[in-house]
Amino acid sequence: MEHNNTMRGVVFIGNGKVELRNFPKPTPRGTQVVVKMKAAGICGSDMHSFYRSQDFWAQHPIIRGHEPSGIIEAVGEAVTMVQPGDRVSVYHAPACGHCEACVRGEYFRCTTIGPGYRLASLKVHGCDADFLLVDQNVCFPLPDSLSFEDGAIIACAGGTAYHALKKADVHAGEYVLVTGLGPVGLCVTLLANAMGAFVIGADPIAYRRELAKHHGATYTLDPAQENLAEKVKQIVKEGVEVAIETSGNDQARADILQATNYHSRLVYVGFGGQTQNIMLSPLLGDRMITGSNMFTGADYYDLTRFLLRKQLHFDVLVTHRFPLERAQEAFDLFATKQTGKVVFTWD
Ligand SMILES: [Zn+2]
Ligand SMILES: [Zn+2]
């Protein structure tokens, strides 16, 4: 484990290789706190930079990880909102707390701190480490009945899933099509089912379809083998009321237009892919189409209340747990997509 003034942190060293390195243990100043990490999730978005070159990562020896949950270990002299011993889920972008974006709870759009400063960006150390230095204002209280793994998942995938469902204005009894059953899609599945909707999950990976079935999907389908829109309309003749696209796959982006009806709500969450434009006009009707990006501070409180009242846990989606020293194995496994959520845990 960590020794006195050093801690361990995971860095990418290029071409899909990671390394566990020693870093100075951070000291909180002013309104900063140090969080002793208890759970940190691996995210689909981590994989976008996992294979970048050795040269690139040699210039950015920044600790990875942006899904933190843990216990406040030490606080700066000006900290008033939290204290040592508090269980927290940490919002993964530093925030001033005062600009318009922050007041809206959209901390990741903070205009004072500016873009590029999210945890594990190229400028700020992330949470795949024994300790994490952040400001008190992004430490949200984690209710006792939620686990640290719940807290880590809420910090990115779960919060993102909840925000998308809120934007979709899901009603009980409606059909929700979820394309992509990675961590975000699985969180959407779990929540939409708990909201009383019927979930149709689509993913080419059988392992992920099975997980989705286990955690709330009434139907699953394989878009690599079946025509998604045709299959969906065999289940719901008129098309689904809601579609949530989490894969970032070009085909899925187009397919959900065909699988919905003229007054459906479509939410695009997944990023990446090549789509330059989707031909909308002949298909649109009264569809409502929106993007959805991350989540707000208000979402955090609404989501944790929802989980508590429904006695739900995101940690049921965790299929693999690793200590930091097995980081290479953890990332390699997650890259195969034969997993649900993969997390680092500490005793
Ligand atoms: Zn994430
Ligand atoms: Zn701000």
Image (tube, helix red, strand yellow):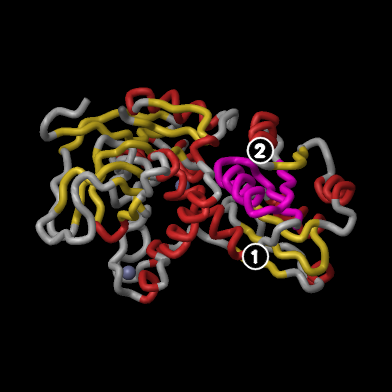
Foreground: 159 or 301? 301
Horizontal side, residue 23 vs residue 44: left or right: left
**To which residue does mark 2 refer?**
212
Q: Position of residue 196 (x, y in %)?
A: 68, 53
The quadrant in which the N terminus is found is top left
Which amino acid type is shown beneath numbered disc 1? Asp
Horizontal side, residue 32 vs residue 60: left or right: left
Q: Give the range drawn in magenta.
A: 174-202
Asked whether disc 2 touches disc 1, contact meaning CB atoms under 8 Å apart, the reply is no
Foreground: 11 or 138? 138
- Identify the residue shown where x is 35% and y is 70%: 111
Q: Does residue 251 show up?
A: no
Q: Where is residue 143 in the image (x, y as percent from the top left)?
A: 38, 49
- Identify the residue shown where x is 83% and y is 57%: 239
Callout 2: helix, strand or loop?
helix
- N-terminal-most mark, 2 or 1: 1
State the separation of the CA atoms marked 2 and 1.
Answer: 21 Å
Q: Is residue 142 above or below residue 207?
A: below
Q: Where is residue 8 in the image (x, y as percent from the top left)?
A: 24, 31
The local crowd at label 1, few if under 14, some if 14 to 19, many if 20 or more residues have their Cα within 10 Å, is few
Q: Which mark is residue 169?
A: 1
Horizontal side, residue 269 vs residue 92: left or right: right
- Identify the residue shown where x is 75% and y is 42%: 218
Which amino acid type is shown beneath numbered disc 2? Ala
